[in-house]
Structures are given as C-alpha cells and as structure tokens.
Amino acid sequence: MPRRSLLLTIGGALVLLAVIGAVYLEIAVQAKATHTAWTVTQDIVAGTALDSSNVRQVKLADTGDPVQYFKGDPIRDHRRAASRLSASHLLSDDDLMPTQSVLVPLTFKSAPSMQRGDKIDVYVLMGTKTIQVGRGLVVEQPNPTTVWVPPGDEAAWVTLQANNSALFAVRSSGVGVPSGAGLALNEAASQLAGSASEGGSVPGPAASPPAAPSPSVQRP
C-alpha cells in the first residue's frame, strides 16, 4: 500500500474514533447532569408558608424530556402554596402564590363555612346588581375572615370593607364558573328560570301509577 494511502487510512480512522469518543462523552455528561428542584414532604393547604418542615431540595436527572418545575428557592423567597399539595409533589411555578400577596380582612353578609386553605369567589352587591370582585382567593383565617389578594388590589378591598359593602362568598373550584360584568336581579331570575326549564333543577319524585281496579265478585 502506498505511503500516502496508508496515512489517509490512519487519519480517517483517528477522526472516526474522535467522533465516536465525543458522542460517548456527551452521553456520559448528560447522564450525570442534574437539576435542582423541590418536593413537598407533607400534605399542605393553600396559603401555607413553605419552609424546611414541608419542602426539601432534590436532584433531578437530565433525561432530555421537558419537566415543569420551580427553579428558585421557595424557602429563601418566602413563597406560599397556591393550592392543596400532597406529599412527594414536585413544585412548579403554578403551585406558588405571587411573592407579594397581601392579607386583608373581609366581612361577609353571607358565606359558607370555611377553613384555612379554602378558595373562594367573592361578589359585591351594587344596587340590585352583583359583581364578581374576587376569584380563587385563598382563605388564611376563617373567623374573622382574612384572605390573600394581589398587592395591586389592596386599596380596592380596603375601600369595599371600609364602606360596609355587602360581600358574598362562595367556596368554589372555579371550574365552569363564567366571568362577567355581573348580573342584575331580573337577569339572575331569567337565567335560573332557563336552567330550571332545561333540567337544571333537582327533579322531584316520579308520580306513582294509578292503582288497577279490583275485580268485582259476582254472586250467583
């Protein structure tokens, strides 16, 4: 074999070995790559402050698949749970309340029984019209009631409370609840009448069928 051909063959083999080595090295590096995440160590309710007693740091292997997880430090950043979380749950951004949430007291004219961590919708009565002013608010304390709200809404909530506005609370998951400008009394009655006519009301017991007449006895 000519010397030039031999050198080309050896050079090609070295290049091939280098490429194969680089590929295996990349695979090895990815196999050892990890991400820092946080998991819940016990069941907690919405509004709970996250600390070392209820969350811990874990390492996630980089598999290449997209995984939604919180990349910050919930303890250092004083974060709170935005919903009920179970033990072993991997924290994501959606599981956390906004960092700057503020706590406001509210007095309701009517409200269901509540407990810490419940989510409620809040309506205010303006004349004969009810308007939804709060959606999915987290209850911190049921009696007297305090809820977490965005800091930009703090003054508005204080104004409603200071003016003794008629507030109504509904314990709700928010699923299927439309958001709108509010309903007047006649609009509410019309909507409920429509729902009832479509079978939205609970049906009453079915009427019993009439009893069959007893055969008469004929005597000879």
Image (spheres, grey):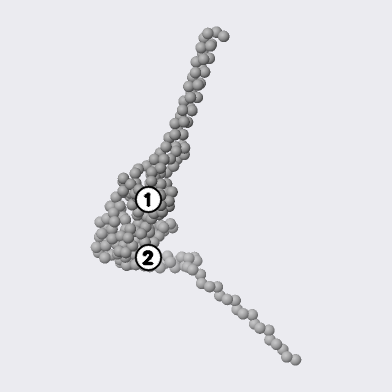
What residue is rendered at 59% in x and 76% in y? 209
Q: Can residue 8 be seen in this view?
A: yes
Q: Between disc 1 and disc 2, whose residue precedes?
A: 1
What's the amino acid at mark 2? Ser
In percent of the image, x 41 and y 54: which residue is there? 43
Query: Residue 141: image x %, image y %?
Result: 32, 60
Q: Mark 2: which secondary structure?
A: loop
- Circle 1 or circle 2, nearest the eye: 1
Which image quarter is the C terminus in? bottom right
What x and y, as percent, mark residue 105?
Answer: 28, 60
The picture quadrant where one finds residue 60 is top left
Q: Quadrant of the N terminus?
A: top right
Q: Residues within 10 Å of mark 1 (few under 14, many from 20)?
A: some
Residue at the image position 28 percent from the left and 54 percent from the top: 102
Whole-percent x and y of residue 126? 30, 64
Q: On the rendered structure, is 24 left or right of 141?
A: right
Pointer 1 residue: 54
Q: How far separated are the C-alphas under marks 1 and 2?
A: 27 Å
Instruction: Examine the image and state in which quarter residue 157 appears.
Output: bottom left
Q: Position of residue 180 (x, y in %)?
A: 37, 58
Question: Residue at coordinates 28% horizontally, 52% vertically from top-left?
Answer: 151
Q: Is residue 213 above or below residue 5?
A: below
Instruction: Report the residue marked by disc 2.
Output: 113
198 sits to left or right of 156: right
Single out the residue that lies furthest toward the bottom. 220
